[in-house]
Amino acid sequence: MAEFNNVHSVTEMPEGDDAKRSFHHRMFLEPQEKKRSMKALMVKQAKKTCSCTPAKVKDYVFSFFPVLQWLPKYKLREYLLGDIMSGVIVGVLLVPQSIAYSLLAGQEPIYGLYTSFFASIIYFIFGTSRHISVGIFGVLCLMVGQVVDREIQRAGYDLEPAALSVLTDTAAYVNTTISPVNQTLQKLLCDKRCYAITVGATMTFIAGVYQVAMGFFQVGFVSVYLSDSLLSGFVTGASFTILTSQAKYVLGLDIPRSSGIGSLIATWINIFRNIHKTNICDLITSFLCFLVLIPTKELNEYFKSRLKAPIPVELVMIVAATLASHFGKLRDTYGSSIAGHIPTGFLPPRPPDWNLIPNVALDAIPIAIIGFAITVSLSEMFAKKHGYSVRANQEMYAIGFCNIIPSFFHCFTTSAALAKTLVKESTGCRTQMSGMVTSLVILLVLLVIAPLFYSLQKCVLAVITIVNLRGALRKFKDLPKMWHLSRVDTVIWLVTMAASALISTEIGLLVGVCFSMLCVIFRTQRPEAPLLGWVAESETYESLSAYKNLQTKPGIVVFRFEAPLYYINKECFKSTLYKQTGVNPVWVKEAKKKAAKRMLREKEVDSSGNQTSISMDFVSEPLGFHTIVIDCCAVQFLDTAGIRTLKEVCKDYREIDIQVLLAQCNPSVRSSLIRGEFFKEGEDHLLFHSVHQAVDFALDAQGHSGTSASK
């Protein structure tokens, strides 16, 4: 196999020209031995995986439970103060957001607190990132809420808000001990609120299973299809849907939640149809909350470098609003919608509803992928910033278990959240211990404080949710800069954002992925393909259209194709090559044939006519160059169509006395050419390791042929 790696062979010249000629020495590259067969590799990997030694078991356990690695090395004096401070601050911020985002997921406030509590503890055990905050994420809550609403409708539950009662919670969980045979009694005991968390927990369980499976099979590559522009557009589009879903609470309207395709438009139509039913008390409360929350949030951001901790304005506002609602009797007097009873303590664990799995299995796929992609991207971003490493597969396990285990304790889907992660980092977080402190703060609320939020208006929670969308909606300000950097990424952002907002979140994500892949295909379908010129006093060739003062060698055209050559762009390759060189060999051959026929006809008519000489001149007219060098440095791979296209191009040009040389082919392309029998016997010298060598070879070959002709 060594012979196919030859750059080019020695050019034979007549004796006596030894002093004038320059030899092109044959360059030999000995290929590496082929890898062992797939069977041998699988057997070796199986032996490695199945072998069990004490050292290997220890490494596996420590790898699967990262807490066992970093906790014994924990430096109390250096780390503890920062972890406690950041943990308490994030916990204080997380309490009101957990309650607010519960509405977005179609759940009762207590379940949001459960979710944040368990997620913080489990990530403390399994996570490898020291800085990310795992808990409720608005976009995932929206996706969960849409599925919950759909399943509630399918189950035939009344879409009107259920009556809030302590007895409901008791009855909701008695059915865990009832035999599956007694389905009628079970349905009577499980009301709408109970069924909502059952659907949410079941989908969370399935999403967690998907994430753990992705970690086990090491298929984290799925996240590479979610580019930064795609994720940003998806989050911004979903933010419009979140804002729309919370608008009815801001206005105090009692209308059903729209779901499915076009839910954003349908919701706004429904809102405007019922605008006359606006609850003035809720509207005034929302306006006052916006008036307080937005300026304070802006001040927090403006002075974040000076403040040791952000002002917990959300918690202060919730306390103030709860007191105002309680002592002002806003529910009884004005009919304001309130949070209702929030029980203390923990409800008994209950497994997911296995009968619901077929209904929600498909919906859990985008939730699992989005949750994993956001968690891993944030983990890697902050790890790089602070100089440590995270393991993507372990992060998949961590976020998967943050969904699987809590699903047995009435929780819904979680992932990392950027806003809380930034707060956590800026307030002194050093290790995962900060997450444990956050869980203790939430535990205090669960055991003692939760019932005090009984009179809290839902419009206040909606305002908190909407104000926290500011970061995603501000992406519109970055569009001019994004357009300047990459128009393709900007279009991907706009398409994904529009599809996520106007169609649905799941379809929007799918549209974004498909569109971004089409953009990649389109880039390779119509790539740049310039002619190259020589940079004086060097061996470098660059684009004639991009740089000035480049030189061309007489009789030689250097062409670069900047994409893989495969079935999609093979016609583009040929048409661009013909256009750039100005010579289509097929047309030239046809023209020669027609001229030859015309010449024969004219000979028959008049053997001495002028037309014959014109035709002969046309037939023998020179084309302006004798060699085409194709620079293949940007051709990553060839498929069978690409190899066939190169064969056709070389054959067609050879028939009109133009030779085609290939330069700078990578090993994969060379191997494809050999397997595709591109070179005939003795033609392997047409493959060169640099454009400069190919040009020198063509010049010497032409000089030799010119010398031979003169003799």
Image: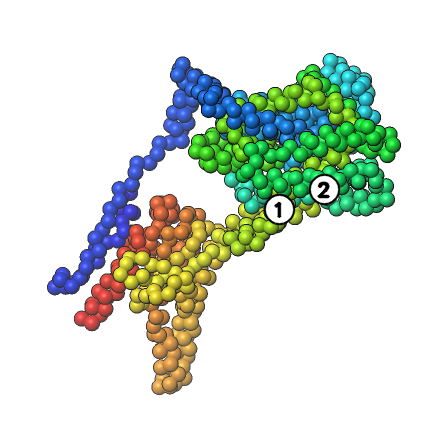
Closer to us: 332 or 511: 332
Residue at left offset 58%, top offset 23%: 437
- Residue 324, can we see it? yes
Position of 84 relative to 259 (above/below): above
Is the Cβ of the residue at disc 2 closer than 8 Å to that at disc 1?
no
Position of 69 relative to 137 (above/below): above
Is residue 610 found left or right of 11 in the rendered image?
right
Secondary-structure class at tag 2: helix
Residue that mark 2 sits on = 291
Quadrant in which the N terminus appears? top left
Residue type, label 2 = Leu
Q: Estimate how packed mark 1 is, as few (under 14), some (14 to 19) or many (20 or more) residues with alpha carbons within 10 Å.
A: few
Where does the image place residue 148, in percent across and percent down from the top left? 72, 31
Quadrant assignment, res 281: top right
Where does the image place residue 97, in percent across and percent down from the top left? 67, 32
Residue at left offset 36%, top offset 59%: 542
Is residue 19 found left or right of 264 in the rendered image?
left
Residue at left offset 33%, top offset 36%: 34
Quadrant in which the C terminus appears? bottom left
Q: Nearer the viewer, mark 2 or mark 1?
A: 2
Residue that mark 1 sits on = 474
Residue at left offset 43%, top offset 59%: 529
Secondary-structure class at tag 1: helix
Furthest residue in direction left, as rendered: 16
Q: Estimate how packed mark 2 is, as few (under 14), some (14 to 19) or many (20 or more) residues with alpha carbons within 10 Å.
A: few
| Count of all numbered marks drawn on residues in the image | 2
- Residue 155, can we see it? no
Q: Who comes first in sequence, dot 2 or dot 1?
A: 2
